Image: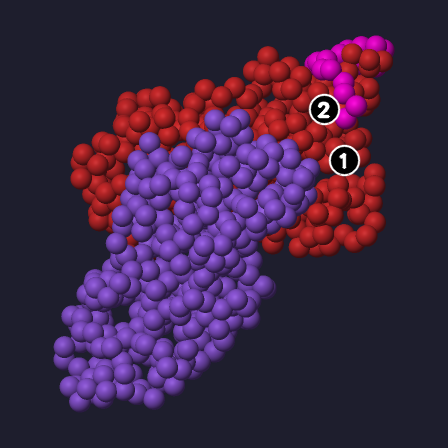
Chain colours: A purple, B red
Amino acid sequence: MARARDLARRGAGRTGTNPIVGAVVVRDGREVGAGFHRRLGDAHAEVMALDQAGEAARGATLYVTLEPCSHHGRTPPCVDRIVESGVARVVFPAIDPDPRVRGRGWKALRDADVRVDVGCAADAAILDALGFYRDRLGFATTVTLKMAVSDDGMVARAPGQRDDVTGEAVRTDVHALRALHDAVVVGIETVLIDRPRLDCRLLPGGVDREPVPVVLDTHARTPIDNEWVRAGRAYIVVCAREADGARVEALVRAGARVFVAPATARGLDVAGVLNALAAVGLTRVLVEGGPRVFWSFADSGLWDAAWLYRSNVAFGGRGVRLFRHDDERFPGCVVDEQPIGSERRFGFVNEASWSLLASALARAGD
Amino acid sequence: MARARDLARRGAGRTGTNPIVGAVVVRDGREVGAGFHRRLGDAHAEVMALDQAGEAARGATLYVTLEPCSHHGRTPPCVDRIVESGVARVVFPAIDPDPRVRGRGWKALRDADVRVDVGCAADAAILDALGFYRDRLGFATTVTLKMAVSDDGMVARAPGQRDDVTGEAVRTDVHALRALHDAVVVGIETVLIDRPRLDCRLLPGGVDREPVPVVLDTHARTPIDNEWVRAGRAYIVVCAREADGARVEALVRAGARVFVAPATARGLDVAGVLNALAAVGLTRVLVEGGPRVFWSFADSGLWDAAWLYRSNVAFGGRGVRLFRHDDERFPGCVVDEQPIGSERRFGFVNEASWSLLASALARAGD
């Protein structure tokens, strides 16, 4: 299933309204076929993997990250193709929350005497396609937090300094993560220090649509000659009502969309920011920091999942720490841990959000 | 929740028919109380953690590895104590499958206006107490496989040789694992090469009852002057009907219990072995290898979970490999990964077994 998850992520940014899906065919302990959903309208992952396996699929096990479909959509039902292939067993983590599926693929397979095993490593698989699961179950917005820290929990070697915390493999993984979101949120400090591009340029297949950069910028300090203007990309600046009018006007003239959200003592109001983004259809939101923005979302409770990348290099005593005190714990639950290059990626979920999702998913399958 | 799981394991081998349980009280990102179920009849983990937290529990979050109970057993209902403590939120992974609980603790908390979040990292928490979950849901036997390999997947540096693959932290972890089982199964080759004691001596608090060593020994070659005879422990030898009568008699005279199981080309029949053990009440079975025994269980499908420990030392080309060919995949799904000392522990589940467990648990909660 870990292999199927890796495959799935290769489709990130090109599946449109479909989720990313990966599939592997295993026979006698050997992989005989592999596939992923490459692009909206293209073959589903199962079909690609079964095509590759050919006759070797007979009696094999199919691992797939999403329940196979049993309806005619842009492609014929995967269930028919699976039954035809002679696969003996299908393993998937959870039911597909799409109202057209919701257990129907499972039932169709069982009725055709294919053995079906459901429920393994469901947390991790749902986490990978969280925006899809939440959307299909009727939740409005999905907020994902992302941070990268050194082995000793630092985000930079010194205040005000830009440091690459992690390597190329993690950067590519982060670009896939961006491709699964509509908007990427950063704080103004990050913009001023790092000048991040917030795009998906490292993905080999490109993406259909880059996510929209969003700067949380109480006082409208975003530079007018920024990376996004130069790249001809749309971007959003969210500032407080109290921001300097001339600066806001200059930003608007330079092509920024400027939204206003209530200011609080700890920065812009998180609910206000999310509402403003949802109003323009940006409902899958990735929050990339810095630490202040990260904690404003974490403390608000208005987040669903978090990915924390940890390198194996220590930055030492002068660094900027992610956690605010020594024994602070991140307010979520780890449900996934994977090596990414020489670093590690931890997947957290917000227990409150997860609890609601799990019960909605259980009801959807009845 | 990872911390609560670690705490839970400290009670391994002393909770009798109760499961191991750990609990942590967290307030403002800080741990203010911790507890675990120490011994059958003693305070439950939640109560111990809340006692330690005292007034700091007010408004805090309680993480516990099992649904709190709402009935009078050997101790008063934990739910009452939780409500009294002023805790604002309780997080647990899954419902308690015990027929006296099954969602009643959850409901009682909710009725008392305590926020309850359920469903995070359920796989890992159930895996930790798998024998308990399966027993309470009506499954007869629980089979856990365990192997330790070097970084390059070897179990020894050369054939016929005993090598410590992993360090002290892993050995202690394995002793806790043994304490959660009734029987520990090894092959005759392992007995002849390693002379394992198969006990729980590294657990600081000791155990109420050591698991029973079981040797799969087709030809009754188990030495009569073995570790268990010297330690005065009961042990079982399972051999084939074809085993030499004199050797069997000598073993019986020396105090071994000898069972007979059908022999197959690949060793003793796994179902036959499990039936013989179940007949004498040994239903939580840990299989510790070597590779031949490991694969006879894995290939039979008659297993539920597997723990694989991997060290960071490579043994090199002359070693004995766990996997039988280069691209072989273990026939299960990883649902947990933890560092244990300088090594890593992977928790696998058998998808078929898990699928049945998940649906039984879902039905139990309705």
Residue type highlighted by circle 1: Asp
Quick one: quadrant of the C terminus of chain A?
Answer: top left
Residue range in magenta is B245-266
The foreground one among B105 and B12 is B105
Read off the chain for label 2.
B
Circle on res. A227: none
Q: Is residue A273 above or below residue B85?
A: below
Q: Quadrant of residue A237?
A: bottom left
Residue nearest the observer in this picture, A321 or A336: A336
Q: Eyeballing the image, is A182 above or below A112?
A: below
The residue carrying pointer 2 sits among few (fewer than 14), some (14 to 19) or many (20 or more) residues within 10 Å by Cα, namely many
Q: Secondary structure at mark 2?
A: strand
Q: Is residue B292 visible?
A: yes
- Whether B269 is drawn above or below B87: the answer is above
Rendered location of residue A35, percent (x, y):
57, 51
Q: Quadrant of residue B259?
A: top right
- Residue hosting label 2: B215
Q: Secondary structure at mark 1?
A: helix
Residue A106 coordinates in the image, percent (x, y) = 45, 34
- What's the chain of the residue with tag 1? B
Residue holding disc 1: B194
Quadrant placement of the N terminus of chain A: top right
Query: Residue A175, percent across and down?
Result: 46, 67
The amino acid sitting under disc 2 is: Val
Would residue A26 appear left or right of B188 to someone viewing this image? left
- Taking the magenta stretch, the answer to whether it contains residue B350 is no
Contact check, label 1 and label 2, Cβ < 8 Å: no
**Identity of the residue drawn at 59% across and 64% down:** A342
Upstream in sequence: badge 1 or badge 2: 1
**Horizontal arrangement in the rendering, residue A310 relative to residue A223 (left or right):** right
A212, B12: nearer the viewer: A212
